[in-house]
Each structure stands twice: as C-alpha cells, then as structure tokens.
Amino acid sequence: MFVPDMCWESVSKSDADRGADEIMSVDAPVSDVEMMIVADELPGLLEEFKNGPDRCTAYEFVAAHLIQSYKYLYTKTPLSDDVSTLYYLIYTPFQYLPTAIAQALFAAAEKKSHYSQADIIVSYLLLVGAIVLELLPIFTSILSYTRKPFRPETAIGWAQLYLFNCIVRPLGWQTRKHWSEELAQYSMIRRYASVQEGYHYHACMPALRKWAGKGFFGSWGVELFDLTRTPLTGDLKLLVLDKLLLEASKQEWKLASFRGERALEEWMGSHPVPEPGRSPSYAALPMSVSSSRVDFATSVLIWHIATDICYFSEDEKGSDIDPHETTKKKKMSRELSLYTMYLVFKCDVMLTRISRLAHKDAHEGLKNYISPFQQSPQVNLDEKEAVKVASEAMKEQFDELKRLADPQEDSTPRVAQQDKTNEEAANKDAAATSTSRTEELLQSTQEALFFPVLSRAYAVAQELMAIDEEAARWDLISEVWLEMLFYTAPRCGAAFHYEHLSTGGEFITHVLLLMRNLGPFLPMPRA
C-alpha cells in the first residue's frame, strides 16, 4: 500500500476531530499533552524520519486530517456514524415515510376542479427542486469518496484503473488533489508595475486599475488586482518541514514565540555584522524585528519591502559556491514574503490600526515614487524596474531624513559621556530602570514617527545588501521569514482556518498541524 493510502486509512480509522478540529474551535491552540510528555524522546523518534527521502509524506498525513475535518464540518458525514445503531434504523423510516405518503396523496388527488394548471406545474417544479437539493449532498459525498487516494496492488487492477480513467476522464471523475496547493501572493510593488515576469499582457493593468478605482468600485477595485497565486512547490514544503525537524532535534520548542529576532541574533553571532545603515546608535536589522520597537504587522511590511529590494537588486559581491541553491532560496524567500503579506494585510491576521495606517502610507509613497514614470504610454515598468525606481526615491528620502537627524546624533556622544560620568549614582537610584525603559519607548516612538516605513525598509535592505556573500544573505532572509511563518500559524484564529477550509484550504493551516504533530511547538495561550 502506498504511503498516502496508509495516511488516509490511519486517519479515517482514528478520532477525526481530535487534531484538526481543535485548531478550528479555539483561537489559541495549544500543544498536545502527549507531545509534552514525550518531548525528551522526540529527537530520537524523528531522527530516522528527518533523514528519509519521503519525509514530505507528513503533508499527506496532515491533508488527510483536514479532509476528515472538512467532511465533518461541511457534509453529512457525521450522520453516517449512526447508521448501524438501532435508533437510526427506527428513526429513518419515520423521517421519510410522511414525505412519501404526502407525495402519494398529492399525486393521487383530484386536482382539476380545485387547482389551476399553473399551480400544479409550480408545485411539481418545487417538488423536483426539493428532491435535487436532497440528492445533491449525497452525490457530492459519492464524488468525494471516489477521489480518495487509490493504488491498485495488481497488474489487472492497474489496467482496470487506466481503462476507467480513459472512459470517465471527460466527466471529471478522476482522482484530483484535495486542496488548492497554491500560495496566495500579495506584492505591494506589483500594483504599480505595467509588465510582470516578462509578459506584456499586463500592460493594460494600470489603466484598468485606474478605471476600477473610480466610481462605484472605489479602492476595492484597485485592490482587486493585487492578489495572484503560485503553486506550492516541493522545495518550499521541504524548507518548512526541515526547519521544524531541525528545531525538534535540538528540542527548541519555543519556535512559535519568535518573529525573526532569534534567527537574526543567531546569524549575527556566526557572521560578521554589516555596518548599521544610519549611525552606531541605530541598527535597522534588530529594530525591524524587535517586539519592543515595532508591532508584528509593521515588521512584516518592512521586511517585505526590503526583501523585494534585495530580490531585484544586482549582486556585485562575487559568485557563490552553489548559485542554483541560492536562486531557489531567493525564490522561496520571496514566496514566503508575499504569502505572509497576504495573511496579514489581506486576511487581517494580527493587523493593528497602526500597521494598517503604515501600510496605507507605504502605498501612497510608492505611488508618488513610481507614478511620474508611468505618465508616458511608451513606458512600461516591470516589477524589477519599479523596485529600482522606488529604491532610488527611498534612498533620497532616507538621506534627507538622515541629514535632518544629524544634530540629534551629534549630541549623542555628549549625553553618553555625561551618563557614563554619573553611572555609579544612577545605578543606586531605584528609578533608573524605569527611566531607562521610558526613554527607550520614547526613542522608539520618535523613530517610528520620524522615519516612515519605506525609509526603514530601505535601511534594512542596505544592511542586508552589505552582506558579502549572497548565499549567506538569503539564508538570513529565509530564516527570518520562516520564523514569521511559524509565529503567524497559531495566531490566525479559529475562524480563519474554519472559513478557508471550505475555499480550497490554506498552507498556513497545514503548517499549524505540522507544528502540533511534530512536537510541542505551539505557544501557551498567554504567549
């Protein structure tokens, strides 16, 4: 038996609502108690699985759980559990017998003298419609069952399956994937690009967006074209799964409590740190992922813009050891960036009013940067050119803000020297800690007001581009986006997973179930 079939059989025989349904019933799912008990033994249990070539079958197991959850939440499958009970055998005839009697009496009744022909036709049409509505769920259930993974065990079985597929393929009865296996992609810069990925069929997009944004549609018409979808590749699945298995082998169970700061700290501990973008008193990279400086949604916004700048920038630092692996890491990192942007700013996952305003201001800034270059109908900017134009404008704005901030920076050494002189007295003061904390919050507030998101994103991008090796740069970017993905998964909310299960499914739901089944990765409710 094939592994997907084994996953299906094991899940169908187990308690279907134990794992997947729990994440759709509470907003703060917690780790399984059994996982917490055997946490010390998990690295040894997962060692063989971690090095196996078929470890991606973990996604098949998770998908089978979600299929069962879908059937229990959106179909009449729970009713079939009581088929064998005596109560069901007695209740069913009485449930349908009155309907059958009413239909028989209706057909046998003399109607010519009491009802018009139009009333009779309408009644029969309503009767047929009711029958169709009753049979439709049954027909859908049969189709769902026929899509169950099936692999013949004999040559005759394979021949029969092949012949059956040849006959019924036009009818759509063949086995197909149970969820979309696609990632929604939201790119801010794509709204202002006339040409995407080298194809000119998008040349009319700016004019179409402009027309849709007027009149009845408003801003909704502009946002209608922001989303695209890309297939979920096996490389991205392995990247996410291998990260979870690596953390499990090290017994690092607090993976969902970090939003990129741990990945940045570990990277800086093993690599030479680039010069800060502004001054020695300000480091753009740590600030961009610090929970005390920016909220999570704003951090996602900053890293999304910085990732796009790095992705479309020409690397002049030299060649890498394995350029093919670096190219794959770049592509997967950007896909994670665009998918996380979709979750936060299109699905309102952990979206705050401040980050919503920052997102709006960033769009206004990009529009002001790029729109002057699109006035001529002969100019068609693709995403790379649009990012280049926006990056140059961000640089000018960043340099201007940096110049205005120089007087404040010049006074910093004197303040620091004075603080050093009074260090002993300050340490004895009980209020020194709270004062320092207040000053830190005041400084972060001033930075947020003085430096907009686009300027901070440009500073982050410049510090990333200062990394000499391109492979090391994208290792850091991918690690930060993975931590953000794992941070987002348990915080999407039950309603998000419940609603999207009926519209093709979301990859983040699969990631959440992987985190729950591979170890006690889920944070405590207060975290």
Image (spheres, rainbow, N blue to C red):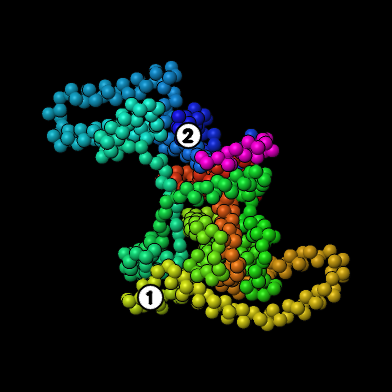
Q: Is residue 60 visible?
A: yes
Position of residue 512 measured from the top left corner of the image (x, y, whole percent): 54, 45
Position of residue 426 measured from the top left corner of the image (x, y, whole percent): 84, 69
Q: Is residue 26 above or below residue 298?
A: above
Q: Disc number at residue 3? A: 2
Q: Tell me if mark 2 has few (under 14), some (14-19) or many (20+) residues whose alpha carbon lies within 10 angstroms of its own.
A: some
Do the residues bearing badges 2 and 1 touch, measured as CB atoms within 8 Å?
A: no
Q: Residue 180 or 297: which is nearer the viewer? A: 180
Sequence-wise, the earlier of marks 2 and 1 is 2
Label 1: element kind:
helix
Q: Is residue 450 above or below residue 514?
A: below
* Residue at screen point 69% across, 79% down: 409
* Residue at screen point 24% across, 32% down: 127
Label 2: element kind:
helix
Please report the bounds of the magenta region as a residue range: 36-54
Whether 13 is among the magenta residues is no
